[in-house]
Amino acid sequence: MTTYKRLSSYHTAVARIQTNWPGFQRKRDARLEQQKRYGAAAEAVAERILEDLFTEVLDWGVKDLNNQVGYADLSLSKLGIKRLIVEVKRPGALAWNQRAVEHAMDQARRYASEQKVKQIAVSDGVILYAADLEGGVLKYRVLEHLDCKTPPESLWWLSKHGLDQCPATADVRELATLPRKNQGEAIAPGAEAGLLHPMHKIPARCFAYVGDASNTATWKLPHRLMDGSPDASRIASAVGAVVKNFRGMNVSIPDQHIPDVLVSLARTAVELGKMPFQGGKAETYKRLEDALDQLGLLDDLKRLS
């Protein structure tokens, strides 16, 4: 049995999720009636849905919720310490749209950096995506849809005790599984705005390492374009800055974050078909592959590609 599933807090939380999920679904449907009547619902509707989720399905109390603190739509506190920042969008604004989720995560990441919070989430009352901020890297925590009939046990990772645990690799569902284009709605004009790097003119999500989302001077190794697609003109330079000196001395990135940075860069290289296991010949990517192999990360990358 996976280690976290041996915890009594896990079994208690999962039982609560299973018991309260049907009631949450009925209440959620009622809150979304105005969307059916008028074709749209306000952001406040999604906020109420999330409050129901955290206090009725999960084990947070109403007293643990904070609204509009430091521009964050919602934050959760445990023993007076803020633990989770949640960026909320109106119902349907994010639903299964990778680009829209990434934009919202940029906002949450910036607010979390300003408030020194290490865990963030975004939701529109339809989907919920959460991740941890470890150094300059986002580490997946939860990706679920809130209209499913089966109670999602993975929500335990956002319970009071689950938030203290590190999700197992085997449980990871990548944000990349979301479609990049929304079938029903384009991203609103100006949604691309926000904090951009002064030289590269792209947001934090386009960099392999982000030390502080509110400080562009800490954003290192640009490798994606504004729309999230691979930046073929920058990826080789970004990879070379790390692998030509394996410990990362060519860029100011803490050693402990180098493996995650390498994986992030490698995923972009894979999308471009640059890796040797895909037939690529460039020495830079050969060094990247060797580094990943040495760290025991190459097989996982191959499985994802």
Image: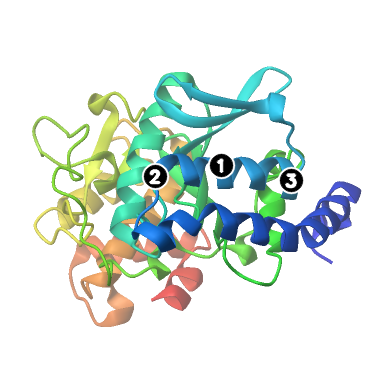
> Which amino acid lies under the numbered mark 3 shown in the image of this protein?
Glu
User: In the displayed structure, does residue 268 sit left or right of residue 4?
Assistant: left
- In the foreground, 5 or 67: 67
Viewer-proximal residue, 243 or 275? 275
User: Where is residue 220 drawn, in percent x and y?
Assistant: 26, 37
The spot of residue 188 in percent (x, y) is: 19, 50
Q: How far from the left and from the top, in percent, is residue 276?
A: 28, 75
Residue matched to label 2: 42
Does 185 appear above or below 93?
below
Mark 2 residue crowding within 10 angstroms, few (<14) / some (14–19) / many (20+):
few
Residue type at the position of mark 2: Ala
Front in this rendered view, residue 202 or 70: 70
Does any portion of residue 233 appear in the rendered image?
A: yes
Marked residue nearer the N-terminal end (1 or 3): 1
Residue at image mark 3: 56
Look at mark 1 in the image and give the residue it sits on: 48
- In the displayed structure, 91 sits above or below 252; it is below
Place residue 137 in its image quadrant: top left
Q: Secondary structure at mark 3?
A: helix
Instruction: Please identify the quadrant where the C terminus is shown.
Output: bottom left
